[in-house]
Image (cartoon, coloured by chain):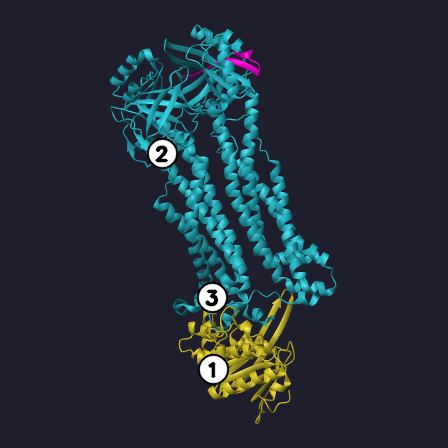
Amino acid sequence: MLRKKLFRTMGRYKAQFISMVIMVALGIGVFWGFQMEWYTLDRTSAKTYEATGFADYRILSDSFFTPEELEAVAAIPGVSDATRFLRVNVAVKGDTDLLGLSVSSNPKVSGIYVTSGEDYDPSGRGLWLSDQYAAKNGVRLGDQLTLVYAGPSGTVEITAPVLGLAKASEYMICLQDETQIMPDYNSYGFVYISPVLLEESMGMETYTQINLTSELSKEEIVPLIDKALGRTSLVLSKDEVVSWAETQGEIEEGVTMGSILPVLFLAIAILTMVTTMHRLTASEKTQIGLLKSLGFKDSRILRHYSAYGLTIGLAGSVLGVGIGYLLAWYIMNPDGAMGTYVDLIDWTLYVPAFCWIVLAAVIGFLTLLSFLSVKSMLRGSAADALRPYSPKRVRPLPLERTGLWKKMRFSGRWNLRDSLRHKSRTGMTLFGIIGCMVLLVGALGMNDTARSFVTVFYDEATAYESKLNLSVDETENEAALALAEARQGDWAAMSSVQVGDAPVGLEIYHVSHGLIHFIAKDMSEVTLSPEGVYICDRIARDNGLAPGDRISFSPYGSSETYEAEVKGILRSLSESVILSDEAADRLGIPYAINTVYTRETGIEAGGVISSVQSKQSILQSFDKFMELMNTMILLLVVAAVVLGLVVLYNLGVMSYTERYREMATLKVVGFRDRQIGRILIGQNLWLTVLGVVIGLPAGVGVLQYLLTALASDYEMKLTLGPITYAVSILLTFGVSLLVGWMIARRTRSIDMVEALKGVD
Amino acid sequence: MSIVQFEKVSRIYKSGDHVLRALDHVSFGLDEGKFIVILGPSGAGKSTLLNLIGGLDSPTEGKIAVDGFDISMLTNDQLAEYRAKTVGFVFQNYNLIPTLTVYENVALVREIVKNALPPEEMLEAVGLADHLKNFPAELSGGEQQRVSIARALAKNPKILLCDEPTGALDSETGVVVLKLLLKMARERGKTIVIVTHNQNIAKMADVIVRVKSGHIRSVETQESPLSAEEVEW
């Protein structure tokens, strides 16, 4: 019989029950979704690394590694396996596309995972092409491609059929260079060929890397490599490679995001539940007393009312798990947000074990919450339990002694006293509005910040149309200078140096045509000084450097160490030390010009130009980045609005129910429905004003935290446009007004006779 | 002259297949300025009568005219205006707003009635001038009912409708409240309609309307009604 009562009571308080189920479902759904996202990426990327033998270390060289050198490295104790490896950008003949061409002499390390076509054959005379690139460009198995490699010793063409389509962990995040933020398989992919085809095409073995797998730390292995090769080498650990570092970054971002948004959702859901369950049991107090006086044991009554929390917990959990899977799938599928960034061999969704623990804890907590709420009502005798619940007595407010109070209308006084009398309800409403505001400011501010970042770095800082990557060494600077002169271009020499233990970029610029601009931390433009160096924000932060300090750096493969004054800190995409060519000459740093920037377009690779990158293609990769961001922003805005609507509606209904008799009295006295509705909306609006005032700075704070935690690599400056402020405030007020209006409409159905005949 | 006139009024409640005729073709009139008691057992339809006069409910059939004005077909807003200007209510359970002080509970009628009487004056008239700043929970039942009377009268209505006004009070306090109601009505020329099942209260009435099973059994005029002190409680 009590089961019937359970369902009928749920029907009676359906608005609260549905709201609570939605809140729990949203809390669990968002929590599960975000946790599943990073955990799935962690598991599936590990699978991809394992299936394709992702290397732990890469030894880089300007010359070609010999089989003997490979043997020497492979023989180092602690090295599990090693391969000679080549990675170079090549052009696709008849197209403007580029491909990363790779060859691994030992396919167990830095190899591929064939998704269709023939298995990889170390002596095969064909191409194993990125399946994503093939799909985007309509390339099919058996198609013939000609790859053009412009090297220092001339241009080489490799023509072969596509034998297989594949994925490779070395290209798991398939970026051409650091200027590209998102993969764009329309214009850049990868291709593997066999060592045999490489030797036949090049006339020699041209491996510039040895990749190896080892459990040793970098500190342990570098001296062993130097000893085995008999020289100092540039060794990059997997942490310094995009496919590993960025994927780990994504996982860490997932963990960070998972600890903010979902926790906010869960916290709001649980706190709303605490308030709502207490109110529900309070309104059921006489019935609880009645059951007790009829002879039901406390334990039976407790079980009955605990079933409310349990039912809400179970229903919310089932829905929440569904939402979680949907959210995780939305991000983690080959065509979803993560699919456009990371190329994985498996997209199965995985759930971390602790998600189940949190699920059980939430259900347990909700059940306990009902249990405790009822337990407090059962205290004392049956007669005590039968007495209706009475909220705290009203006490005069300090404000009542001021002139302001006297000027306040009845509606203001009523609302203010009601808000203070029901502090937890008011607090939760405020919390919901603040949460809504924080999410809106965070989401829209992220959009503003990213747009401003693109504008500053790509529209304003770069005035070139084409970036020419050159394959020259320092003895051939004359050819590069002649090219820059002919193309009316600026030029740069990019290389790697070591600052402390970390490898960073060294970028030497000659800017005479204004094609490259440098941006200071305060977003002002900087002209490179003929003396000293500039550093990016990350180097400054990691090494505790400020302008005026001195920095030491040593190029890889050289025993030289250079020391220079830090002239300033720049916002930079790459983690680099930046200086002018004059400053480099004064410091005596040798360099090879390997990049020329020009306003000209339509330049093809050939001669010293190994590849050409157009500004357009870089901007296109940003469009994808913005597309991804817009998806996230849309999700957050929807989440904010749903959160605001559900929390405010639930609490609004609670307020309506608790003030029902008072509103019925007002109706009897002669107040119109509109007037009573306006009073209810007024209370919501005042709380919204307060929530917006608190939520706005809180949103800015959360955004700043997220930018520091998630996007420090991009050195973005927090930017919030007036439209963001306006939209966030208007949307929050919109949600509040909509809920207020929905609740106010209910005043029409107040049954004065029913409401007022009950016992006070 | 009748201030309230019922013509063949029925109020039927339906719940599924169940039909309840709370009032069945009722016709009667109530004179202005009188102290009227509607008497009947529980479920007789007396509260339904009061609710219909007060504009809290509308008849299923028939016509109700109050002060010459047909209220049976009014919209929600028109009924609200009617309640604001023509009638005042006093309930068994007082129905005060707990978060407003005594003064504010009475003063709130100024939000809807332009020529409302001063709250201080009304509260003084019911003997609560010293409790203006108290909240309802700080008052006794009798005091709360007096606030309720002050609030009803502050609108300066033509009719005061009272639903078991002494039902929640002990007899001594009940007498005080009844005396007050009678005094206010007489002094201010109000029509008072009290719904009760208490036969003793009927002894004070100018007119007694007896209701049973949704029908008017009788409308009796008492030439010499007793005062509250004369009634044996």
Q: In this view, does A179 lie to the left or right of B27?
A: left
Q: Distance between the residues labelled 2 and 1?
A: 74 Å
Colour of chain B in the rendered structure image: yellow
Taking A321 as reference, is A171 above or below it?
A: above
Q: Is the magenta stretch mostly helix, strand or loop?
A: strand
Q: Which chain carries label 2?
A: A
Q: Mark 1 lies on which chain?
A: B
Q: What residue type is labelled 3?
A: Leu
- Say which residue label 3 marks: A397
Q: What residue type is labelled 2?
A: Val
- Camera-side residue: B71 or A108? A108
Tell me the cyan chain: A
Taking A715 as reference, is B224 above or below it?
A: below
Q: How far apart are marks 1 and 3 (CA)?
A: 25 Å
Q: The residue tagged with tag 1: helix, strand or loop?
A: helix
Q: Say the numbered circle drawn on residue A454.
A: 2
- Say which residue label 1 marks: B124
